[in-house]
Amino acid sequence: MSTPIAIIGTGLAGLSAAQALHAAGHAVQLFDKSRGSGGRMASKRSDAGSLDLGAQYFTARDRRFTEVVQQWRDRGWVAEWTPTLYNFRNGGLTPSPDEQVRWVGTPRMSAITRALLGALPVNFACRITEVFRGEQHWGLQDAEGQSHGPFSHVIIATPAPQATALLAAAPKLAGAAASVAMEPTWAVALAFERPLDTPVEGCFVQDSPLDWLARNRTKPGRETTLDTWVLHASSAWSKQHLDLPKEAVIEELHGAFAELIGCAVPAPVFSLAHRWLYARPAQGHEWGALADADLGLYACGDWCSSGRVEGAWLSGQEAARRLIEHLGR
Ligand code: FAD
Ligand code: NAI
């Protein structure tokens, strides 16, 4: 068996790279600090059913991604979500229908990365703190002080701020990652016993602490008797209220929701708040992936591309492509 390739991060970028390398006959070993895969596409299991707190849906514009999404659909991992869309601007709510195809994981967003992970070897609850070069191979050190390896190559598939320290062996790559600012998003989920009296199923919001809201249970396959909603605060509001206690965030965003939704909003029977510290890159980049091919160190993630689900997948593919190409020389 050949020396495996380490991949740090089991979000879509890491799993996209893992799939491509596995398909090309390379052994991979994945690591994630969380207890499960998905990263920002993870879903939260709760008393109100599973809730998509991060990525809400995704679009496919690149031909390669469009093709792969069709395969995911044929396997039942994703389905189209066709919400009744609204726009909230200047204090007014107006219908905002469009023709855009929007995809979601079924029965929850995390189904996609779970399926991609399949039986690939993975260490969960393992936060990598250092990527170091041995005489011939790479090694990893985790937060418990344990070492992992040897590995022939390392792919770092974490958000840019977390990638910077892990890229210390390649200062140029570390510098590029350090230049990427990532902005936070506060997410709140609310569940109501009876359906709210509104046709809104998704809404793009301006001029409010919120920038998006979705009726979670209108996504295909979401089993719940409650009327579940996910609210996202804008980057600006999230930055200003980064350290607000969760209860206060729920109260503020529940208030903003009640103000704009145009119907009576009772007290929710369930609520939770989640803070995404590195939710989205402040700007898109067109790096595809970062690579020091001679060293054998790579970085990928949405921040190397469009800052969306599609960008994360494309970036993972690009890291794998460059690694395989270098091996073939
Ligand atoms: P991530 O999903 O962040 O994966 C990185 C992984 O690395 C994580 O699992 C993390 O636990 C792990 N990790 C980090 N550091 C370490 C370490 N030191 N050791 C081990 N593991 C580590 N995109 C869309 O297209 N449509 C949307 O509607 C949309 N909405 C969004 C809403 C929110 C609130 C957020 C936060 C994001 C949204 N996005 C959306 C963006 C989308 O979720 C991301 O672009 C995509 O999921 C990023 O995937 P990734 O693999 O690059 O990173
Ligand atoms: P998309 O094409 O549906 O949306 C792109 C943008 O176009 C929207 O943000 C919105 O401003 C506008 N828009 C689209 N349809 C609209 C409509 N019917 N009415 C009014 N405005 C409309 O999807 P795409 O390009 O795949 O983007 C994904 C979404 O993910 C975006 O909304 C983006 O803001 C969101 N996102 C959120 C993050 C966060 O941290 N909160 C991180 C990354 C992406």
Image (cartoon, rainbow, N blue to C red):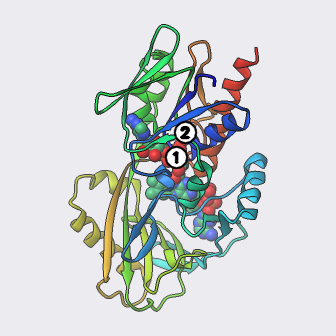
Q: Position of residue 198 (x, y in %)?
A: 49, 88
Q: At 50% across and 41% down in the image, what residue appears?
A: 122
**Mark 2: few/some/many CA within 10 Å (<14, 14-19, 20+):** many
Secondary structure, mark 2, is: loop
Residue toward you, 142 or 273:
142
Beta carbon of the mark 1 residue lies under 8 A of ligand 1: yes
Q: Are marks 2 and 1 in contact (CB under 8 Å)?
A: yes
Beta carbon of the mark 2 residue lies under 8 A of ligand 1: yes
Q: Residue tagged by mark 2?
A: 301
Q: Residue tagged by mark 1?
A: 11
Q: At 24% across and 63% down in the image, what residue appears?
A: 246
Quarter of the figure with residue 220: bottom right
Tell me the kind of residue under disc 1. Answer: Gly
Q: Is residue 116 left or right of residue 272?
A: right
Q: Is residue 15 left or right of residue 134?
A: right
Q: Quadrant of the C terminus?
A: top right
